[in-house]
Amino acid sequence: MITTQHIEEDLSRAYVQAIAARAGINLALRERSHDYGIDGTFHQVSYRDGGREESGFSLDFQLKASINAAVNEQHVIYDLDAKTFNSLVERAARKHTCPAILILLVLPQDSADWLALSEEQLVLKRCCYWTTITGALTSNAASKSIRISRSHQLTPEKLTSLIGTVAIGGPLQ
């Protein structure tokens, strides 16, 4: 059996694949053996001359999953490893790069509650939240606590909005 961490990772990948598919956005997931800080890319698809093609606008993401995120009325609080935090801050500060977001799948504490299925439905419990990481680098060696607004749920509608914002050069909010 694979590790619990790998199960969490696979569930987060499944969530993102389902959201991208429902939104009609092309998704490229990176190979696990070559993860250099970006786990995948969403690609906008356009209709042109009677067919569909990638528009050239994309949004990269770093994917995390955790049972240890704290959820209050307004925020999800998560201890992001310092290396990932600094990598996303540095990337956001660079001009003319493909934007990148952090996506966090918050899972229930009990692994028996992560997934439920029947002939009628497949239910992945809890949800993914997204955020941009900007500001000053952290000097922490291990992790940096971040707050993600609970209004930043990753839904098909929100993903469509995010890639549309990238296409017009707007800020991701």
Image (cartoon, helix red, strand yellow):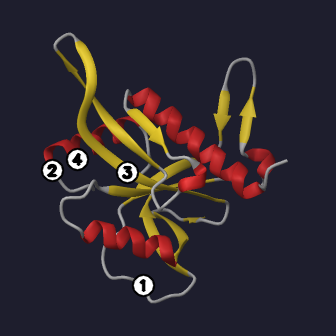
Sequence-first disc among 4 and 1: 1
Task: Give the residue type at disc 3.
Answer: Asp
Hey, what amino acid is under mark 1? Thr
Under circle 1, the secondary element is loop
Residue at numbered disc 3? 60
- For numbered disc 3, what is the local secondary structure? strand
Dots 4 and 2: beta carbons under 8 Å? yes
Residue at 39% across, 30% down: 23
> Which residue is labeled 4 in the image?
166
The residue under the point 48% across, 61% down is 36
- Residue identified by numbered label 2: 169
The answer to whether 23 appears left or right of 140 in the picture is left
> SS of the residue at dot 4?
helix
Of all residues, the one furthest to the right in this rendering is: 1
Would you call the spot at circle 4 few (<14 residues within 10 Å), some (14-19), or many (20 or more)?
Answer: some
Q: Are marks 2 and 3 in contact (CB under 8 Å)?
A: no
Give the quadrant of residue 15: top right
Give the amino acid at mark 4: Val
Question: In terms of sequence position, does the residue under pointer 4 or pointer 3 come before the other?
Answer: 3
* Disc assigned to residue 138: 1
The picture quadrant where one finds residue 49 is top left
Asked if residue 139 is positioned above or below residue 69 in the image, the reply reads: below
Residue drawn at x 72%, y 39% as measured from the top left: 115
Residues at marks 2 and 3, CA–CA distance in whole angstroms: 15 Å
First-in-chain label (1 vs 3): 3
Location of residue 72 with respect to 9 vertically, above or below: below
Q: Is residue 81 left or right of residue 136?
A: right
